[in-house]
Amino acid sequence: MSKPLTIADLKTMARRRVPKMFFDYADSGAWTESTYRANEDDFAKIKLRQRVLVDMTNRSLATQMIGHDVSMPVALAPTGLAGMQHADGEMLAAKAAEEAGVPFTLSTMSICSIEDIASVTTKPFWFQLYVMKDRGFIERLIERARIAKCSALVVTADLQILGQRHKDLRNGLSAPPKWTLNSAMQLATKPFWCLDMLQTKRRGFGNIVGHASNVSDLSSLSAWTAEQFDPRLSWDDIRWIKDLWGGKLIIKGILDDEDARAAADTGADAIIVSNHGGRQLDGAPSSISMLPKMVAAVGDRMEVHLDGGIRSGQDVLKAVALGAKGTYIGRPFLYGLGAMGKEGVTTALEIIRKEMDITMALCGKRDIKDVNSNVIAQNPF
Ligand SMILES: Cc1cc2nc3c(=O)[nH]c(=O)nc-3n(C[C@H](O)[C@H](O)[C@H](O)COP(=O)(O)O)c2cc1C
């Protein structure tokens, strides 16, 4: 394929390069995947106002998310197993994000560890926390994020138990892949991926193995998740984490206004309106459709961010117009990573940046900080 021009181009390239079990792990939602599809489809229902004959020079996408300067209101979302889309994937993505001037969020379930990311970056990154039953392990994880100088903690609230993604079960997803006929066939057709992977030692869950008690092998993600993630997680735990961490706190996975108000009551700095990219409650509404309600509920008390379904700079602009102070991309950067490693993540960010910039200009705006509902022609939500 010639130079990728869209996130869809990167997805096509990733599908060719990445073994099926890991490509599908990214490109999947829970059960019927209806929420996964709605996240993307609902962005297309919002129409923009075309404006003409206004000065379109000297445009700026630079803004702030939770007080941090960002070159555009886009962060990389935490995604588990990014180091299986490409060898050392999280380290490559973190470097691409740093060069692009946007935040990188490392997942608890990453392949590269917190310390690995700190060793290849010069600016602080963000760390996403899954809360496990073993609170001692959580305390140590938070301490490791502090030592690594992470500048925000993103607590994920919408995965106390794991939604079922059929493809993962059918493909026998594990990290590292288990040797079965099924996995051997998936790997045999992806020689470049295999060659890269043979050259790194990072093939397990870097934040967990060797750190959590009694865990040496985590090859079955769903079994470990079911056993370890805390289904009793409560707002009191969020307050405990906030006190323990003492820094900027973002609560991820809010889709309901009552929950948004409870999140604001904790004193957190931001919420992420999110349904985990359609990977948890299938049948939940798209995140963009719930954004206006969340902004109305708590927008005057904390920052409201959004993820889910962003596939272009136009989508980011629409989210900002509906009140999001920042957005996150999950699959778009994973496709870039799978397709071309670090260069692919840079490409994904540049595609989104360019689309956002031109869209903003054609809507008659020059500064992302001036973009509001005024640029929307039709909002079905
Ligand atoms: C492959 C994959 C792995 C993910 N792993 C995590 C994770 O470890 N922690 C988390 O909070 N969210 C995780 N998410 C959810 C993302 O952070 C984000 O909410 C979602 O990807 C946004 O939707 P998008 O992919 O349409 O941009 C994951 C998403 C994907 C696609």
Image: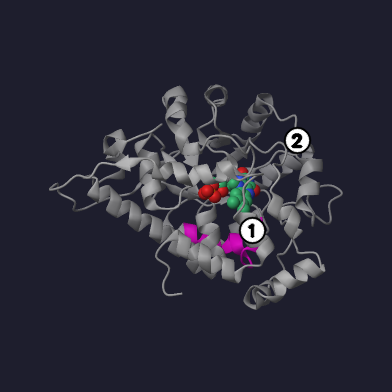
Which numbered tag is attached to residue 114?
none
Q: Is residue 377 shown left or right of residue 324? A: left
- So how many labels did they put on this image? 2
Query: Please, is residue 266 above or below residue 361 in the view?
Result: above
Could you tell me what secondary structure mostly forms the magenta stretch? Answer: helix
Disc 2 target residue: 230
Mark 1 CB within 8 Å of ligand 1: no
Residue at image x 77%, y 71%? Answer: 184
Foreground disc of the pair 2, 1: 1
Query: As displayed, is residue 281 above or below residue 12?
Result: above
Spot occupied by residue 313 in the image (x, y as percentages of width and height):
38, 51
Instruction: Name the residue carrying label 1.
Output: 24
Report the amino acid beneath label 2: Asp
The spot of residue 356 in percent (x, y) is 34, 51
Q: What stretch is highlighted in magenta?
A: 81-97
Residue that extends furthest to the left in the rendered view of this protein: 53
